[in-house]
Amino acid sequence: GALRTIARTKLRIGMIPADGVGREVLPAARAALEALGSSIPKTEFLDLDAGFEYFTKKGVALPEETVSAMKNDLDCALFGAVSSPSHRVVGYSSPIVALRKAMDLYSNIRPVKSVSKTPGERPSIDMVIVRENTECLYIKEETMSLGPNGKEARATRLITERASRRIGQMAFETALARGSSSLLTIVHKSNVLSVTDGLFRETVRGVPALPGVDGKYDAIKVEEQLVDSMVYRMFREPQVFDVAVAPNMYGDIISDAAAALVGSLGLVPSVNAGDTFVMGEPVHGSAPDIVGRGIANPLAAIRSAALMLVHLGYDGPAKKLDEAVDSVLRRGDVLTPDLGGSCTTDQVTAAVLKEL
Amino acid sequence: GALRTIARTKLRIGMIPADGVGREVLPAARAALEALGSSIPKTEFLDLDAGFEYFTKKGVALPEETVSAMKNDLDCALFGAVSSPSHRVVGYSSPIVALRKAMDLYSNIRPVKSVSKTPGERPSIDMVIVRENTECLYIKEETMSLGPNGKEARATRLITERASRRIGQMAFETALARGSSSLLTIVHKSNVLSVTDGLFRETVRGVPALPGVDGKYDAIKVEEQLVDSMVYRMFREPQVFDVAVAPNMYGDIISDAAAALVGSLGLVPSVNAGDTFVMGEPVHGSAPDIVGRGIANPLAAIRSAALMLVHLGYDGPAKKLDEAVDSVLRRGDVLTPDLGGSCTTDQVTAAVLKEL
Ligand SMILES: CC(C)[C@H](C(=O)O)[C@@H](O)C(=O)O
Ligand SMILES: CC(C)[C@H](C(=O)O)[C@@H](O)C(=O)O
């Protein structure tokens, strides 16, 4: 992407902890980035507001200043996590969904890889989920009406050729970066949604024939899975998958499935990437059950910072962060409770920093 | 339900093998029903057409005669499986989706239970998925238009109060039948779809307060899970779930997740149940990879026949079938390849019949 080719003297990073454990893991990601020292441009951090908690205080979940800072003053951002109210709250709408749309962060990239205990052992899962991030049911066009038998609610699911093409391109590029003979799995449900998912699948399949592609994707094997059987197969034979591309909601669901396979949501990073901005975000949520106890797993947030660096073109420093996380996992003596350990967020973060 | 209270001198059963291994497993279910002898009313089987193969020959996937026979001449039916064309086929639309709608089979009930090898051992998963079966994205209202950036496809997701209420009632009844202190998990994604999934969740939650319920569900514990975290938790701690109720598409996905947990889709039965008709259906598909080799697992079809009998009020004979299947599984020496065995459909069927 274009973001990789920009020369920067500073790296201006927006920090949006939002809710719950988002506030506990973002400082870990910041510490990890700072520990990289001069191997990346000088970092500048800017704290930004968003979230359900902010909404309850100020009546808005995503303040305009946050979006305008991201648009005008920042190179990238890290997002924490957002709480879902347990009952419908009038006027509240998920700030993460709004942010993805406002910044046109059209791809949500979620690498899921198990760390093997013995060197050389094949990881049981090693895949990247490339999730469309701006449309599908996430456009939130919903209506309520009164029919003869009571209330009737409708939501619109939008799938466009444009969004399917650009996420398809991102998926083929992701597959190519993993080796020219990668496997790309298109996830859909076109046996029911022949028009919307039909458009998604045909558009993604059409990417290798686009002008200018010049055969570079020719060695990538393309297959398809219906979303239900994708979930089934991910649990039966996860090792066969490589890159999977999916419309927004299927991507949401299969990334949680993948996270279950590596042992904890607390390990899975993501970036929300567009053509002009990238935002790292751990896949886990705000975890109300453990909030405030200092035991949230910081590794997904640190990995999200690394993934953000890759998208900005700093592959070397990103690799350092990933390797530090991997060795902490491989050693296995400093882990948070979600991984069976008894250490705190701070202890795990310190262990990562020590490896750097 | 009302179906349980009807006195019958005959049991008229429609057989709709449809496609692929559907044709190989339905005879097993028939043999099992016939082996029940006089413990159920005299069975009469009527073969009915439907499916993608039928469509390619006759241009229609669900002939009117099939629907009218079900409406007028039959007590119940068994459905095999349906193939999905690998490319969009003009005029073709899934007959199983159409059948569920035409017969108003509004609930799809999918019990998923692992068989413990040692007696007394707690099964690692023992849950029932109660899936709404007539609406959500399955109404197939899709449109295609041309926007400034190319094609735009839209699908409507419909959630009504009426359908949510009746599936909610079915879910509470299912929970009650499993013991008054069961757990009912409502699966939704109301953090994004606050109107449609908001209506689903509120309507299901409202069932215990309906007139005439008179506190009978008071001891049932109700909780909620977002669909993504439901999939995650089903893989991390499946033993906590009991009854789950979900809109159509989430139900589709989580039932494949559950099937993965018991080792094979070839084990999971379902019924499509309405107020006046019930149709058994194995959850597995047409399995084009193994079709014609005589090795399809007949156990899901046999269990679907048993589940159909339960819904017709023949609990004793249904239990006999289930116990026969369970002992074949527990013995473990006569299994099809999906379960690691090397036996054929016929051999497994014979083993079940021997247990009866
Ligand atoms: C919080 C929620 C809106 C979000 C989503 O569904 O996209 C989350 O589940 C995720 O995966 O990032
Ligand atoms: C074949 C398909 C239309 C069907 C569905 O999605 O309902 C199947 O996956 C199922 O679960 O019965």
Image (cartoon, coloured by chain):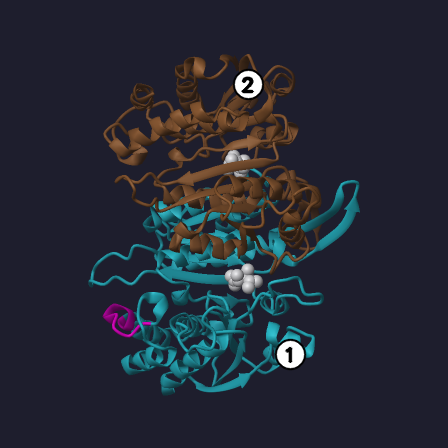
Chain colours: A brown, B cyan
Residue B247 visible in rendering: no
Helix, strand or loop under label 1: helix
Q: Amino acid at mark 1?
A: Ser
- Classify residue A152 as left or right of residue B307: right
Give yes or no for residue A318 being in the magenta stretch.
no
Image spot of residue A140 (x, y percent): 64, 39
Counting every numbered tag in the picture gives 2
Which mark is drawn over residue B96? none
Which mark is drawn over residue A49? 2
- Classify residue A299 as left or right of residue B275: left
* Category of crowding for the residue at label 2, using alpha-carbon neighbours closer than 10 angstroms: few (below 14), some (14–19), many (at least 20): many
Stretch in magenta: B327-335
Q: CA distance from mark 1 to mark 2?
A: 60 Å
Along the viewing direction, whichever of B95 and B75 lies nearer the viewer: B95
Q: Chain of mark 2?
A: A
Depth check, mark 1 against mark 2: the one in front is: 2
Q: Is mark 1 within 8 Å of ligand 2?
A: no
Along the viewing direction, whichever of B274 and B197 lies nearer the viewer: B197
Image spot of residue A259 (x, y percent): 41, 41
Q: Amino acid at mark 2?
A: Asp
Question: In the rendered structure, are the residues bearing label 1 and label 2 in contact, judged by CB atoms less than 8 Å apart?
Answer: no
Residue drawn at (47%, 27%) of the image: A315
- Classify residue B64 as left or right of residue B13: right
Rendering quarter of residue A291: top left
Along the viewing direction, whichever of B318 and A232 lies nearer the viewer: A232
Which mark is drawn over residue B68? 1
B11 w.r.t. A60: above or below: below
Q: Quadrant of the C terminus of chain B?
A: bottom left
Helix, strand or loop under label 2: loop
Residue drawn at (28%, 34%) of the image: A330
